[in-house]
Structure formats: structure tokens, C-alpha cells
Image (tube, rainbow, N blue to C red):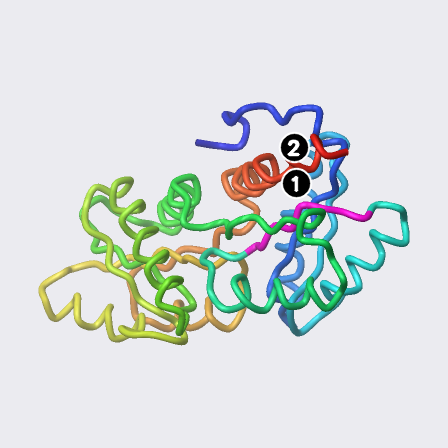
Amino acid sequence: MTASARESPPALLRQVPLLLVAHGSRNPAADAVVRGLAAAAAVSGPGLDVRVCYVDVRGPTVGEAVAELVAQGRPGAVVAPAFLAAGYHVRTDLPEQLRRAGADPDRFPVTPALGPDRGLAVAAFDRLRAAGHRRGDAVVLAAAGSSDPGAVSQVRRAARMLGTVVGRRVRVGFAATGHPGVGALVDGLRRSGESRVAVASWLLAPGVFQERLRASGADVVAEPLGVHPDVVGAVLDRYRAASFPLERAA
């Protein structure tokens, strides 16, 4: 389902700011994706005040973003983690940074991570088809990886969602933390008789992990999800669900 097909954003989108929180990267292209996603969300929700901050590497930090909102007389926002699974940064790091910033949890509610989400699975398949996926290809969903079992479970759930779109089982590989690694999984699929292997990127933006996918030896490697309409739609869905209690309390 594309963002245009989702329910039109209600008037409340003009009331509560959205704080989009990403990991942070030294790669300017990754930063451009995050800011592009924020800009697209603002356009899709007319009047929506969207801010961007990061938990690591670059600024503004979470604390700086919270301080700026409070200084501007807006002591509250929906905090949406721009992550595809709820690993350490979503479950531990972000809440701790909000706590240190003095952010009232009732005024700064944190939404679930963007994934797993069926719309994002559709977006991943769109990227895969654009890269040259053919019907019958073995498909790998490639994520960065995590030492958090819950986050890994969410990636496997996303793979099952993608499998319903692709029409066959989708395996999971990891670019950094976790097993199997993407390259080893691609090699194993070839040894098992698969003639072509396609890698779907379960990454939001380009960077070192995406380059590892390109080096995996797969026949097809999709681009990251980026500013796909269904990613924008997922952001707005998370925002919409969390903003109702804030509106009622206003």
C-alpha cells in the first residue's frame, strides 16, 4: 500500500511535532535520506512540524532537539525511531537519552520502530524489482544485524512478510552482527542449486552495510528502502497512533 493509498492525515497532524530519530552516519547520502524522509512526511501531513535528530555520530542530538522544542514553547513531540527493528538504540539508548534530556514520557511518547511492517516489505520488493529481480530468484532479506534477539526476531518476521509478496520463502542474512552473513548465505544458496540469488536490502539508507550487500556476490542487490512512499506512510502511521493521547491532553 502506498502512502497515497493510506488514510489521509487528520487535522491533528498540525498540532503535535514529530521528532524523527535516526542512528546517524558520517555518510552524507545517509543523512540526505533521513532528511528527505522528514521532508516527505511534512508534505504528506500538511502543517506537521517535523524535526530530525540522531542517537549517535552526528547532531543534533536527542537532547539538543528536546531542548530546542522546549525553548520554543513546544514541550512535547511524538518521537519516532527511524529504525527497521527495535534493537539496542530503540529499546535502551533512545529512552535513556530522552530521560537525560528531562523529556516527560507522557509528553514525548516513543513510537514502535518502523519495522516490521507489511508496507515496508512491499517497498523492499519494489526496490528488488527495480534492481532486476526475476520470478523464481532465491531471495535474501539483508539487515545490518543485532545482538538483541527481539530485533532479530523482528527481521525474520519482516522476511516472512516479504515472502508473501515474493511468493516464496525468503532467507535472512546479516551485513554486520549475526549469522549467517549475507555473503555466506548467497554462497550456500548457489551450492544448493539456486541459479540466481537476489538480495533485498532491509536498510533505510546507503552506507558501509549497503556496500557489504553489493559485495555479497548476489546476481541482484536492491537499493535501501530510502524515501519510498510506504516508508513515509509507516512514519505517519506511527505518528498518528501516538499523537491522539497528546491531542486529548492538550
Residue 154 placement (x, y as % from top left): 36, 56
Helix, strand or loop at mark 1: helix
Q: How far from the left and from the top, in percent, is residue 70? A: 85, 53
Residue 186, compared with residue 140, is above or below; it is below
Find the distance from the CA under tag 2 to the CA under tag 1. Answer: 6 Å
Query: Going 30% across and 49% down the picture, which residue do you hit?
Result: 133
**Residue 129 sits in quarter:** top left
Residue 167 drawn in magenta: no
- Dividing the image into 4 quarters, which one contains the N terminus? top left
Which residue is located at x 65 percent, y 40 percent? Answer: 41
Which residue bears the numbered disc 2?
A: 44
Dividing the picture into quarters, in which one does residue 32 lie? bottom right
Q: Is residue 23 left or right of residue 70?
A: left
Left or right of 23, for residue 196: left
Residue at (24% x, 54% y) in the render? 170
Going by the numbered disc 2, the residue's amino acid type is Ser
Residue placed under numbered mark 1 in the picture: 40
Q: In the image, is 198 to the left or to the right of 110?
A: left
Residue 125: image x %, image y %? Answer: 36, 45
In this rendering, is residue 22 above or below 137? below
Q: Magenta residues, as a range? A: 75-82
| Relative depth, front residue between 169 and 149 | 149
Query: Mark 1 Cα within 10 Å, few/some/many (few <14, many 20+)?
Result: some
For label 2, the SS is helix
Q: Relative to residue 175, is residue 29 drawn left or right?
A: right
Q: Where, quadrant-wise, is the C terminus in this rendering? A: top right
Amino acid beneath label 1: Ala
Q: Residue at x 40, y 49 (%)?
A: 116
Residue 113 in the image: state x and y as whole percent.
Answer: 51, 52
Q: Are marks 2 and 1 in contact (CB under 8 Å)?
A: yes
- In the image, residue 111 above or below residue 4: below
